[in-house]
Image (cartoon, rainbow, N blue to C red):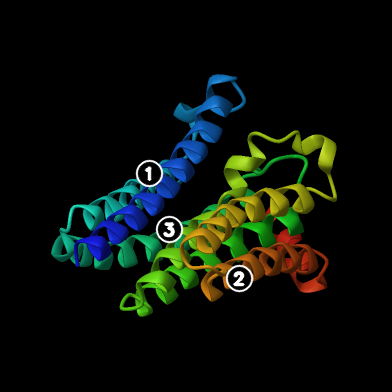
Amino acid sequence: MATTAEGAVRAGRFWQRMAIGLAVFIIFGFLQFALRGFVDPVAAPWWVHLHGVAMLAWLALLVVQPTLETRGNLDLHRRLGWAGAALATLIAILGVYTGLASLVLNRFPPFFTPPYFLALTFVEAVTFGLVVMAAIRKRRDTEWHRRLMIGATIVILEPALGRLLPMPLMIGWSDIPVGLIQLSVVGIIALHDRRTLGLIHPATKAVALLVIAVRVAIYLLSLAPPVAALAAKLTG
């Protein structure tokens, strides 16, 4: 029994470290971008600030939840899980709204075409929300639940990566390096699976396929005439 408990604590610590790593990476990506003078946070609309606060709350929750597991406080973990469901829904809605409003106000990055930016914000926001909901439905299956929660956050690594990678030099093919970096994060989980389970967990494979599907969907949707027409209408 003691050995089993120790193994559970070690597993919890791995997911805690994964959550901390993702949170630090995302915050660093946005922070260095602002400190380099590429954005004026004060001039940003209220909905940008609201989206930022919601994302910080999500990252905090992502770190707190496995921490509670390692400490055996499963009751609070479960209660916060329902708050996380509401927060993920809010983030998905804000993500879609922010994408639409950014097009209307011409606040999107100049190296993205309007159809691509529209597809990017919509697909990533909706996918994030759906994967979190799937993780909550799988809450009684700890291995699936953990991987889907981290997987949802991996899907939305792109905004931070967009502020770290030389995006103007990668116009038209930025999905490839973004996808590869996201898959490398999934690879860390796969290595953990092999070390602790002896095989790659099906949820880890599902997250890898999801990362690829999201990048392909964004690219294909950006070429769809209805998406182009809507983007043109929004940008006036």
Residue designated by label 2: 205
Residue 40 position within the rendered picture, expressed as x and y whole percent measured from the top left: 53, 26
Q: Residue at x 38, y 78 (%)?
A: 138
| Residue 129: x %, y % from top left | 46, 67
- For label 3, the residue is 91
- Which one is nearer the viewer's eye here, 148 or 122? 148
What residue is drawn where x is 75% and y is 39%? 110
Q: Are marks 3 and 2 in contact (CB under 8 Å)?
A: no
Report how far apart the C-alphas of labels 3 and 2 lie in the structure. 25 Å
Label 2, label 1: how far apart the Cα atoms are:
27 Å
Question: Amino acid under label 2?
Answer: Lys
Tag 3: amino acid: Ile
Question: SS for tag 3?
Answer: helix
Categorize mark 2 by other alpha carbons within 10 Å: few (<14), some (14-19), many (20+): some
Residue situated furthest top in the rendering: 36
Q: Which residue is mark 1?
A: 56
Mark 2 or 1 closer to N-term? Answer: 1
Residue 145: quadrant of the picture: bottom left
Picture coordinates of residue 140, whole percent (x, y): 31, 78
Task: Say which of marks 3 and 2 sits in front.
Answer: 2
Labels 2, 1: front one: 2
Q: Nearer the viewer, residue 109 or 1?
A: 1
Q: Secondary structure at mark 2?
A: helix
